[in-house]
Amino acid sequence: MSKMSFAKLASDKIAKQVILALIVLAIGIPLNYYMYALVQQKDATADTGIVSAGNELALLKEKKHDHSEEVSHDDGEKKETALEHAGKHADPTYICPMHPEIVTKDSEATCPICGMDLVVMENLGEADIVQLSSTVINALGVRTAPVKRRNIYRRINSVGYVSIDEKNIRRVVLRTDAWIEELAVKSEGERVKQGDLLFRVYAPRLVNAQEEYVQAIELDNGDGLLISASESRLRALGVSLEQINSLRNSKKVEQLISVYAPQDGVITELNIREGDFVPPSKSIVSIVDLSSVWLQADIFESQVDWVKEGQSAEAKLAFMPDKIWEGSVEFVAPSLDPKTRSIKARLRFDNPDELLKPNMYANVTIFAQPKRRVLTVPREAVIRTGDQSRVIVAQGEGKFKPVIIHTGIETDSKIEIVGGLDEGQEVVVSSQFLIDSESSMKAALARMAGG
């Protein structure tokens, strides 16, 4: 071989070796860098103590994948799923009862937000049950109340105003022409007792009737017909039986006839003065007994069929907010007001101290027909959402579970339970919203774990 051919062959061999070395370097350097980064990331994950709920679920899924086949026992016990088997071998996870987004593997850690001790995350298989320690229950102030059977009333809340009981109004009128000679009451608002003198009148017909009565007594032949006819005329003119008996005994005709108060009460109208001429059609005095009053309340059209006569009622007034007056429905108007779309219900209240004054405004509560022996829970125990109502049921040993319920009649403090609960169960009446939030979070984690 010539010297030139040998040199060319040697240069070609060197070139091939150089090219091969470059290819090895081009593949090896990036691969080595990638492996180094992967190792670093794995070490960092192993060193940290706090992981998110999503990472925890990812670990459970990975273990579920590694144990995809069911594990059976030789002694014939029930087979367990891969997820249950993975949960037995997984390290316990700790979570904050108040902030479920705080999840850690460190049993000594506390919540960085509220400082509470972390508790072990429960098995996601009981996603709707919340387990709380006695310390947490005391810290949250959890209180419960029993589901009990009670008689509850449908309540109608309204407003109204006090008015005079028209059954207690007495008007004094004369049955003949007369002149007011003496006036014993001087102004409206004066209080009178039954039998008190109101005024004295001069009435020619009353004088003539008295004279005829006296003559009939003197001319009586024993049959008493004249006396009876004269007495009837006096009674028709408004003379009382006591005045007739006094005239029979004295046989003295009175020129001025006295008019007395027919009942106890307050003078609300006084339409005369001394010297006035009074025709028979004119109302002279009105006397109102305020020992009982009416309260006129407006009832909405949708509640008309709830209100019946005889139902009990309560009233509160602004000047005595702590006092409750008790009364009853006396009358329900037969027609609806076309403007307000409501009806008037007339309530009657005893008023012995006359604290209720006409035209006072009042808040009224009418108790409709009761529903007897129905299941009830305290009103504050019910959690309302857009499409359902639920309560938190205490199951004992620190376990709480949300339960969907169906409600009926509601009062100020109680709610009827139509379905979802049984008598004797305990429902949470304070801090139930916190427990419900924890239950919702656990249910969401369970759904993610099963996805």
Image: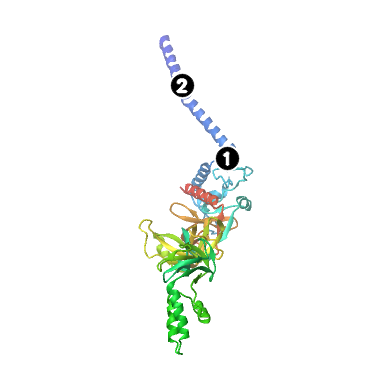
Amino acid at circle 1: Ile
Q: Which of marks 1 and 2 is nearer the N terminus?
A: 2
Q: Do the residues labelled 1 and 2 touch (CB within 8 Å)?
A: no
Residue 294 in the image: above or below residue 245: above
Identify the disc placed on residue 142: none
Residue hosting label 1: 50
Residue 270 percent location from the top left of the image: 47, 62
Q: Which residue lies furthest to the left in this view?
A: 338
In the image, what residue occupies the spot 41% across and 9% down?
A: 4
Front-most of 38 and 258? 258
Q: Answer left or right for 198 relative to 277.
A: right
Residue hosting label 2: 22
Amino acid at circle 2: Leu
Residue 45 percent location from the top left of the image: 56, 37
Q: How many labels does the image show?
A: 2
Residue 232 seen by the camera: yes
The crowding category of the residue bearing disc 2, from other C-alpha atoms within 10 Å (few below 14, some 14 to 19, many at least 20), is few
Front-most of 172 and 419? 172
Q: Which residue lies furthest to the bottom in this view?
A: 222
Residue 312 seen by the camera: no
Residue 212 in the image: above or below residue 442: below
Residue 55 percent location from the top left of the image: 52, 41
Query: In which quadrant of the rendered image does the N terminus lie?
Result: top left
Front-most of 183 and 372? 183
Of badges 1 and 2, nearer the viewer stands: 1
**For numbered disc 2, what is the local secondary structure?**
helix
Q: Distance between the residues labelled 1 and 2?
A: 45 Å
**Picture colour scheme:** rainbow
